[in-house]
Image (cartoon, coloured by chain):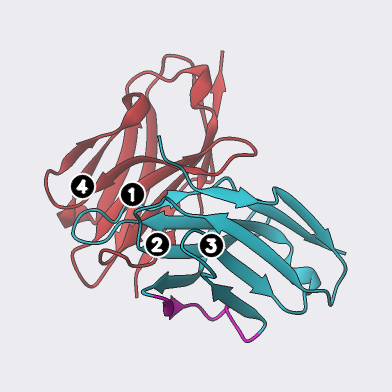
Amino acid sequence: AQSVTQLGSHVSVSEGALVLLRCNYSSSVPPYLFWYVQYPNQGLQLLLKYTSAATLVKGINGFEAEFKKSETSFHLTKPSAHMSDAAEYFCAVSKAAGNKLTFGGGTRVLVKP
Amino acid sequence: EPEVTQTPSHQVTQMGQEVILRCVPISNHLYFYWYRQILGQKVEFLVSFYNNEISEKSEIFDDQFSVERPDGSNFTLKIRSTKLEDSAMYFCASSATGGSYNEQFFGPGTRLTVL
């Protein structure tokens, strides 16, 4: 069975500071990995995805994530936080195309001026 | 840009009533999904649908739930007799078929409140 663990349910960063959101996965097969963002009262929007083409994945809004098989991690980073980055971020894993997504518990990001 | 749409955005119902949540997936997608998010909890998979049949379902998706693709565009989730614990945000998603195109596109959700 697959699972995803996100360390830290809440993260507070200052505007302009590094954003680092941690995600570790367990999967019996090479996984597809995703980061989604949920703004208040909205649905889930895909930030980026890993599908084995490259270990460093660049997404929208300046976010990127690095797949590290040895650490079973897929941490999300952004060099400089913006106020508009305040949202909840979900890491998710699936094992194949057309397969269900298993989500982590989410990390809510607060950006301080 | 194509998007997944869901109606209604909010649904309030009495316990024991039937509700139907509607979704219009992206037109050339072949995989369809329902997820739910109880307030303050993680997003949970309910069911996936492909080629006019359920391909996978979770433990949550019991006999009270059903899905249907009644025509070429809509995808519905029916809850036959709602319980208080069905109160949640329900998300529909769709994806194209094959390989790395597993990106699931989510709709904005329907907030279901069972009184």
Q: Are marks 4 and 3 in contact (CB under 8 Å)?
A: no
Magenta stretch? Answer: B52-63
Question: Is residue A8 found left or right of A93 in the rendered image?
Answer: right
Q: Can residue B19 be seen?
A: yes
Is disc 1 in contact with disc 2, using a CB cutoff of under 8 Å?
A: yes
Q: Quadrant of the N terminus of chain B?
A: top left
Residue at numbered disc 3: B35
- Is residue A104 in sight in this rendering? no
Q: Are marks 3 and 2 in contact (CB under 8 Å)?
A: yes
Distance between mark 3 and mark 2 Cα atoms = 9 Å
From the viewer's perspective, tell me whether residue B21 is left or right of residue B48: right
Characterize the local packing of mark 3: few (<14), some (14-19) or many (20 or more) Cα atoms within 10 angstroms.
many
Callout 4: SS: strand
Q: How far across and down, in percent of the image, does residue A45 sit?
A: 45, 41
- Which of the pair A23/B45 is nearer the observer? B45
Report the residue at 51% width, 69% height from top: B69
Query: In the figure, is residue B50 to the left or right of B75?
Result: left
Residue at 18 percent across and 64 percent down: it is A30
The answer to whether the residue labelled 1 contacts the one labelled 3, judged by CB atoms less than 8 Å apart, is: no
Q: Judge whether residue B102 is colored magenta.
A: no
- Badge 4 or badge 1: first in the primary sequence: 1
Q: Is residue B53 on the magenta stretch?
A: yes
Q: Position of residue B15 (x, y in %)?
A: 85, 73
Q: Give the residue at x 20% y 54%.
A: B100
Q: Could you tell me the amino acid type at mark 2?
A: Leu
Q: Which residue is mark 4?
A: A67
Q: Residue furthest left?
A: A53
- The chain that hosts pointer 1 is A
Question: What is the crowding at mark 4: few (fewer than 14 residues within 10 Å), some, or many (at least 20)?
Answer: many
Q: Which color has been applied to chain B in this rendered view?
A: cyan
Q: Which residue is mark 2?
A: A101
